[in-house]
Image (cartoon, grey):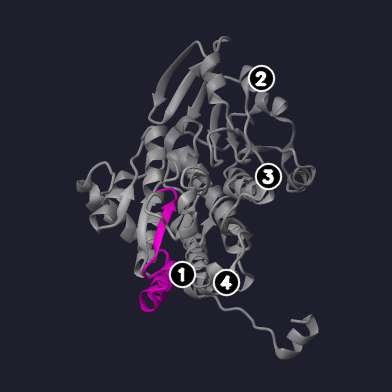
Amino acid sequence: MSYIKDINLAPSGELKIKWVENNMPVLRGIGEDFLREKPFKGMKVALSVHLEAKTAYLCRVMEMGGAEMYVTGSNPLSTQDDVAAALASGGMQVFARYGCSMEEYEECLCRVLEVGPNIIIDDGGDLVNLMHTKYRDLIPNVIGGCEETTTGIHRLRAMAKAGTLMFPMVMVNEADCKHMFDNRYGTGQSVWDAIMRTTNLIVAGKYAVVSGYGWCGKGVALRAKGMGAKVIITETDPVRALEAVMDGYEVMPMSEAAKLGDMFITVTGCSGIITAEHFESMKEGAILTNAGHFDVEVDIAALKAMAVESYEARHNIQAYIMPNGKTLYVIAEGRLVNLAAGDGHPAEIMDMSFAVQALSAEMLAKKGREIEAGVVPFPRELDEAVARRKLKAMGVAIDSLSQEQADYLGI
């Protein structure tokens, strides 16, 4: 029995899913292949990804391939109740509600694991972690899984290094058709979409402090620059910091950036990026957001402890009045801003990311028992297949190597 808010919300969710389906031609084509071939026939798939329309369409594509889907969200504030209802109304097992407590969130994760899944599709590593701690007796059922995020991959690599990862996990985030587009163009656009629709404030002329200059940080900084912001990058990696300088951005420690920033976006995948010492030096009206997977990058607990007063300034914006009289604003409780305060990445971008997910799952369904436990790279030939499908859908043709050229390159 599904655990959702209200099944009567389904018609609204259905419209959202139909919209993204029309704008996800690569995944739609894979779904047609799955419908013919049924690669997941007889298999249970547990999925924990931000539960909005694009994820819902991935779930339906997997179901077209014969999968018995058990679905939950990967963040309590990113679940869209009408989308969850739409999936449940079609008979899928869905366990997710917007704004649920952390206890309810973990219970939903448990519900999709206790069925004994064969394949796990994870976003952040929570399902895999629970499987290895609470449901170890069900591990023999697991053929393997796929991980969507940088944060999740960090956790998996730590498990693999310690020798505790008990089944193969495909590194979806490291596929070129995922991180080069989803992390850069998807995050870049969706973060600012969420900030602007939530605040209704201009970006031009403001100091935007972006913490972390990986693929996500590059995208956030690029879009900020394009809208006229004065962009500051904070980094711990000297090579990435140098790259940011060469890209034309100011680079400085957070202790200095905190004094200048109007808008802060953390996108590091690490904890303790903006802390009490930084709050003290921020200027009036500074806006704090996080675009990393977990809500640990902005120290909200310290901010609450420091504040002399707090109130909701606007929907999804909490104001904190500091002892010095200045007011700081936090969007979406410091959770993943583009999903907790927006609709996430554009459909055309997630078309590629979820195509990679679907093909990773298909690879596991066909060959997973032959793959050793540990972290598994996404095959280059599948990366190129996704790119070719996307180019074809966009009406773009490219050259091909002649045999002579291939011989010259040693291919």
Which residue type carries mark 4?
A: Leu
Q: Is 197 part of what is drawn in magenta?
A: no
Precedes in sequence: disc 4 or disc 2: 2
Judging by the rendered image, the residue that carries numbered circle 2 is 277
- Say which mark, if any, is on residue 213: 3
Is the C-beta separation of discs 3 and 1 under 8 Å?
A: no
Residue 231 is situated, as x and y percent measured from the top left of the image, at 66, 38
Q: Which region shows up in magenta? A: 23-52
Q: Tell which circle, 4 or 1, labels the residue nearer the N-terminal end.
A: 1
Q: Which residue is mark 4?
A: 382
Query: Which residue is located at x 60 percent, y 59 percent?
Result: 373
**Residue 281 sits in quarter:** top right
Q: Inspect the image, locate mark 3, and give the three-letter code of the amino acid beneath it.
A: Tyr
> In which image quadrant can residue 220 be found?
top right
Query: Residue 273, percent across and down?
Result: 64, 31
| Residue drawn at point x = 53 percent, y = 25 percent | 300
Disc 1 designates what residue? 26
